[in-house]
Amino acid sequence: MTWLMLLGALLCMLCVGLGTPDSEGFPPRTPHNCPHKCICAADLLSCTGLGLQDVPAELPAATADLDLSHNALQRLRPGWLAPLFQLRALHLGHNELEALGLGVFANASGLRLLDLSSNALRALGRHDLDGLGALEKLLLFNNRLVHLDEHAFHGLSALSHLYLGCNELASFSFDHLHGLSATHLLTLDLSSNRLGHISVPELAALPAFLKNGLYLHNNPLPCDCRLYHLLQRWHQRGLSAVRDFAREYICLAFKVPASRVRFFQHSRVFENCSSAPALGLERPEEHLYALVGRSLRLYCNTSVPAMRIAWVSPQQELLRAPGSRDGSIAVLADGSLAIGNVQEQHAGLFVCLATGPRLHHNQTHEYNVSVHFPRPEPEAFNTGFTTLLGCAVGLVLVLLYLFAPPCCCCRRACRCRRWPRTPSPLHELSAQSSVLSTTPPDAPSRKASVHKHVVFLEPGRRGLNGRVQLAVAEEFDLCNPGDLQLKAGSESASSIGSEGPMTT
């Protein structure tokens, strides 16, 4: 037993002395097939800023996001993406690529984002972008692009954002969009190029959602009256691509660089433009009002029958049969759009896209839907209840008329109401003697009364210039106004008595 214990202690000491493979004595583990000086983290591979002139030979197969930007890459080998079957994003910006070539993206069927910005590309061929059927965003800005093949983007059926700004393009066909599908395209950046001629009817025929994402600023556009009216209408409608860059929309008045003017700030150039040629360029949108909770039906009216009809919702969702993802919008067999229960989310612009052999590929019909809450309905008028209420009110009024006392004065005044009495001669004599008395009011022989009931007016003397003087009647009976006598002041009483004898 002792030797077993010694053997166990020796093994423990050996393990402590050697340490674990993760200790400082061993270098850290590197991911499998991670290129030298690159950074590998799960499905991310970053080889940016390493001065690479060629793509690393071995790339991890689990890479979903590959960043090779800010290097010196001059060419890409055909089929170099074959091992990266999980690739979703590829960053090749800020390199020295001058051309792409056939088969460069042949094995990138799952790629969603491709960044080729800030390179030296001069042209795009017909098959340079083959194999990118799932691509959604393509960044080609800040290159030297002069020419685009007529079908350069033919295979990019899912492309929604295309950035071609800061290049040297002198023309761009909006008729076929170089093979792009107008159904999915939401952003088309053509700013800061050399576009000197644009077909106004082709611009007017674009879908409404693409007009909202079409950037044409910083181009030497012609000072054409129809183009001016079209852009002015887009600006009034609040399209963000025109509204946000209104100051940067310029045109050439005399086809020389020195005659550049701003579209929306130098309106004098377009004072002689008549609005008649601009009429009919755009098909006016229909304004519809819908109530929350009600149903709505939209029809795609086209000049000739269409083979395929699709819709674009205000949330930029492409709607095909059977309908939207949340099930609130249905696309019926005849191509019409039906909403069974209208909600606030359904407010906005619905665009119908009709395609067919005899139709323009982007012929559209637009509906601007406004959603409102229904007004509360007034309560029904109940004639029976109102009749009963009228009878009750009439009965109460009749009872009040029959049994209520007719006196409208205060209760105290009604209680002390008396019939007027004819004053006796003795009472009149005492009243006159009190008026002619010269005894001062505060004489001790006169009993002071604490019951002063009313203030009445006293006729004024000559010295008062016709004004009245207030006096107080003592022990005046409010309910017997017949006993009211006017009382002269003390001064007037003494003056009367001094003028001479008085006959009573």
Image (cartoon, rainbow, N blue to C red):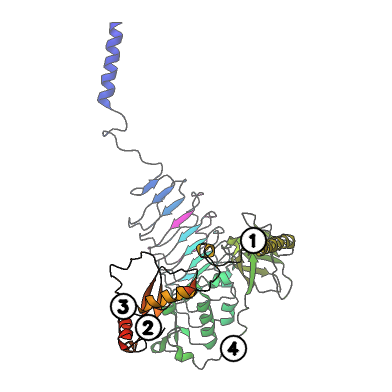
Instruction: Identify which amino acid the numbered label 2 is placed on.
Output: Val
Which is nearer the N-term, disc 4 or disc 1?
4
**Rendered image: mark on residue 342:** 1
- State how far apart marks 3 and 4 are (Cα): 112 Å
Residue depth check, mark 4 versus mark 1: number of the one nearer the observer = 1
First-in-chain label (3 vs 2): 3
Tag 2 secondary structure: loop
Q: Nearer the viewer, mark 2 or mark 1?
A: 2
Of the pair 7 and 329, the residue shown nearer to us: 329
* Between marks 3 and 4 in the image, the one whose residue lies nearer the viewer: 3
Q: CA distance from mark 3 to mark 1?
A: 100 Å
Name the side, left or right, on which 329 lies relative to 33.
Answer: right
Provide the residue span drawn in magenta: 84-110
Instruction: Name the amino acid, label 4.
Output: Pro
* Quarter-of-image position of residue 27: top left
Mark 4, residues whose alpha carbon is within 10 Å: few (<14), some, or many (≥20)? few
Q: Residue 269 appears at what percent x and percent y?
A: 46, 91
Res 438 label: 3
Work out whether 255 lies above or below 5: below
Whole-Å distance between the Cαs marked 4 and 1? 39 Å
Q: Secondary structure at mark 1?
A: loop
> Is residue 101 one of those drawn in magenta?
yes
From this viewpoint, which residue is outermost toward the bottom? Answer: 272
Question: Closest to the observer: 95 or 291?
Answer: 291
Q: Position of residue 471 (x, y in %)?
A: 36, 76
Q: Mark 4 highlights which residue? A: 277
Question: Residue beneath label 2, please?
Answer: 468
| Callout 3 touching callout 1 (CB < 8 Å) | no
Quadrant the C terminus occupies: bottom left
Mark whose residue sits in front, 2 or 4: 2
Q: Nearer the viewer, mark 3 or mark 1?
A: 3
Q: Main secondary structure of the magenta part?
A: loop
